[in-house]
Image (cartoon, helix red, strand yellow):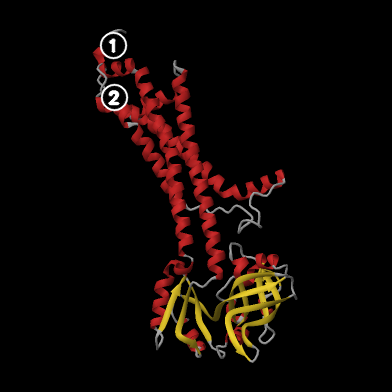
Amino acid sequence: MFRPLSFYIGLRYTAAKRRNHFISFISLTSMIGLMLGVAVLIVVLSVMNGFDRELKQRILGMVPHAIIQGSEPLADWRTVDAEVQKHPRVLAAAPFIQGQAMVTGGGEVRGVLLNGVLPEEERTVSIIEDHMIEGKLEDLVSGEFGIIVGRTLAANLRLQIGDRVTVVLPEASITPAGVLPRLKRFTVKGIFSVGAELDGSYTLIHMDDAAKLMRTDGKAQGVRLLVDDLFAAPKVAEEAASMLSGRYYVSDWTRTHGNLFQAIRMEKTMIGLLLMFIVAVAAFNIVSTLVMVVTDKTADIAILRTMGATPGRILRIFIVQGAIIGVFGTLIGTALGILGALNISAFISWLEGALGHKFLSADVYFISYLPSQLQWEDVAIISGAGLAMSLLATIYPAWKASRVDPAEALRYE
């Protein structure tokens, strides 16, 4: 079978046992270093993708993707709701009334974001129903002044289903007894848990009760939208608002939570670059390996040159040898990285059970497990970078080999 001479000799040099065992050791460590660098980089980026996914699904599943408001409360919110849902990229819409308030209970006071919603509409734009740990969204009934709170808030105020809390608005009412804060007693109807800071500051009440408490005369403050693509929310909101007759204002999640996701994206980029240096160091070891191989094989190179091998062929021989180290190291590392990324969550769960220690406590972190999301784009970039760096590392030693002078090399043989 025909095989190119450069490839054949390069393969023989890689597989042959060397008199200098130190060179073989350096070759092995170069391959292992490249393999571990690629594998760790894939696993770490997959874990960061998992955290990014969880944040998007949980936080942005609760807060509005976009909202449309008028200069005044919307008396005809049903018309606005129906019109914006005609936009092809708006999946659902629901009215809301929102305001800041303080909740007192169990001798404690906490500031919260009070959200007046319609249960039957809210379930179409929010994931709250999937994260109720006690009670249900339908328990919010108009006129009963019920409230749904997060798990953290319930723990801080020592609340349970059926307990009474006082909601205080940061507005004063003038009464015959003087200026008094506006307050109302509510009954805890449900407790949810989605993680992050929302469990300690996000509350829901029926929109009719919110309208009475905030004196909006039954009008909605605005309409929140669920769109098909988070990153298209600003554009979709503007287009949906332009479909309405009248003057409306729009806002979206990039203004309220955009900094959080920009920080995560920057952190992922920086960690990726730092870990890429591990791959670069491993690839650089190929340089030292090939330099020693060239020194060890100087006589062989001289003999090949006297037999008619051109400098270009000698160059290709050592490029093949270095490329084999790089290719095998990168491919094995990629396979291990994919395997690790797909099983890291299960492995950490098993390790927590074996050690009896929880690495991600639900009381501290917004999720109680290590998420992982393998993205093939990341795998392709990491593998390509590993291969490219390992191939670049072969150029200088191979060029030095091609410059060996046969007469000088064989003078003392």
User: Residue 16, can we see it?
Assistant: no
Viewer-nearest residue: 389 or 278: 278
From the viewer's perspective, is residue 85 above or below residue 361?
below
Q: What residue is rendered at 48% in x and 44% in y? A: 41
Q: Residue at x 63, y 72 (%)?
A: 129
Element class at badge 1: loop
Question: Total of numbered circles in the picture?
Answer: 2
52 above or below 140? above
Q: Which residue appears at 68% of the width and 73% of the height? A: 104
Q: Which residue is mark 2?
A: 400
Give the vertical position of 355 relative to 306 (above or below).
Answer: below
Q: Amino acid at mark 2?
A: Lys
Horizontal side, residue 107 vs residue 405: left or right: right
Q: Quadrant of residue 298?
A: top left
Q: x, y (%) of residue 68?
A: 46, 80
Q: Nearer the viewer, mark 2 or mark 1?
A: 2
Between 376 and 150, the one lying in front of the other is: 150
Looking at the image, which residue sits at the far top?
412
Give the image location of residue 95, x and y in percent: 54, 82
State the residue position of label 1.
410
Left of 151 or right of it: where is 241? left
- Residue 237 screen position, x and y as percent: 42, 76
User: Is residue 28 or residue 49 the one in the foreground?
Assistant: 49
Q: Quadrant of residue 291?
A: top left
Quarter of the image that includes the C terminus: top left
Regarding mark 2 in the picture, which secondary structure is present there?
A: helix
Q: Compared with residue 127, is residue 291 higher up or lower down, i.e. above or below?
A: above
**Dot 1 amino acid type:** Leu
